[in-house]
Image (cartoon, grey):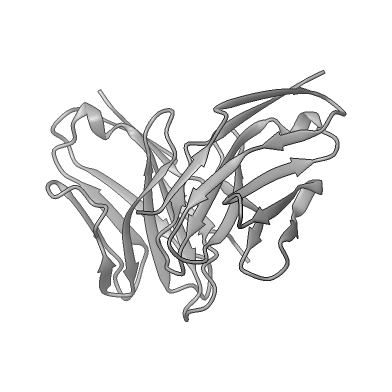
Amino acid sequence: NAGVMQNPRHLVRRRGQEARLRCSPMKGHSHVYWYRQLPEEGLKFMVYLQKENIIDESGMPKERFSAEFPKEGPSILRIQQVVRGDSAAYFCASSPPGWGTYEQYFGPGTRLTVT
Amino acid sequence: AQSVTQLDSHVSVSEGTPVLLRCNYSSSYSPSLFWYVQHPNKGLQLLLKYTSAATLVKGINGFEAEFKKSETSFHLTKPSAHMSDAAEYFCVATSGTYKYIFGTGTRLKVLA
C-alpha cells in the first residue's frame, strides 16, 4: 500500500508566480489535511478536506491560498502571487473515513522556495 | 487553547546511552498524544500514540512514552540510542478532533 504521495518534492517560484502543490492520499483514505512548516518551527494546521468539501480552513491565510480535493484526482494546495514569506515545507496527511481514530499519515512534503 | 511544549530544542546523547525527549501539553479535555519522527528531507513517521488506554505506550524502534496526567507530560524515552535515531522529533496533541497541535520539535543528535 503506497503511502501519501506529494509532488513536486521541491518547487522554486519567483515572487508573484503561482505555486500548485499536489497530494495523493493513501488508498482508501478520504480525509486530507494540509500543514505548513516554517523554518525552525513545528507544523501548523492549514486546512482539512474531504472529497469535494472543505471541512475546516481555519488555518489558511485569508488571501492567496486555496485548497481543493476533487472527486477524482489529488488534493491541490494553490498559492497565488507567492511572496518570500511563503517559503516553507508543506505537508499533506491523510486518514481513513469515519471517526474514532485520529491517526494521520504524512507525506514527504513539498519544499517551496520563493526567490 | 490547547498547546504542546517541547522543552528542549536540541538534545545530544552518546550512542548506547538513554534518550529522553520531554513534552508537556495543555488541554481542557483528555487528549490523544503522538510522537512523530522526521528524518532530513523525509516525511513524518509515527513512532507511537496514546489514546486513553495504557499510560505506558510502546512504539517502534525501541521507543516508549508515558502519559502522566498529573504532570501533563508525555515524555519520549529509549534505553539505548543508535546513530540512526538522529532526527527531529515532534510531540503532537489533539483533543478528540482532527486538528493536530504540534510542538516546535526536538532535534536529537547521537554522538559516536
A98 horizontally vs B87: left or right: left
Q: Residue placed at 54% from the left, 73% from the top?
A: A101
> How far across and how far down the image is residue B88, in percent?
59, 34
Quick one: which residue is furthest to the bottom in this view? Answer: A98
Quadrant (top left, top right, bottom left, bottom right) of the N terminus of chain B: bottom left
Outermost residue to the front: B70
Q: Tell me where residue A45 appears, x and y as whole percent.
A: 36, 52
Q: Is A69 placed left or right of B93 in the picture?
A: left
The image quarter in which residue A83 lies: top left
Q: Position of residue A51 (x, y in %)?
A: 33, 75
Picture residue at 59% right of the left edge, 62% below the top: A2
How many numbered dots are placed on residues in this image? 0
Q: Establish if A83 lies above or below A57.
A: above
Task: From this view, report whether residue A31 is shown above or below residue B74.
Answer: below
Q: Is residue B12 left or right of residue A27?
A: right
Q: Quadrant of residue B50?
A: bottom right
Task: Judge by depth and name the residue closer to the eye, B52 or A41.
Answer: B52
At which x and y percent is residue A18?
Answer: 19, 41
- Residue drawn at point x = 82 percent, y = 18 percent: B112
Give above or below for A67 relative to B109: below
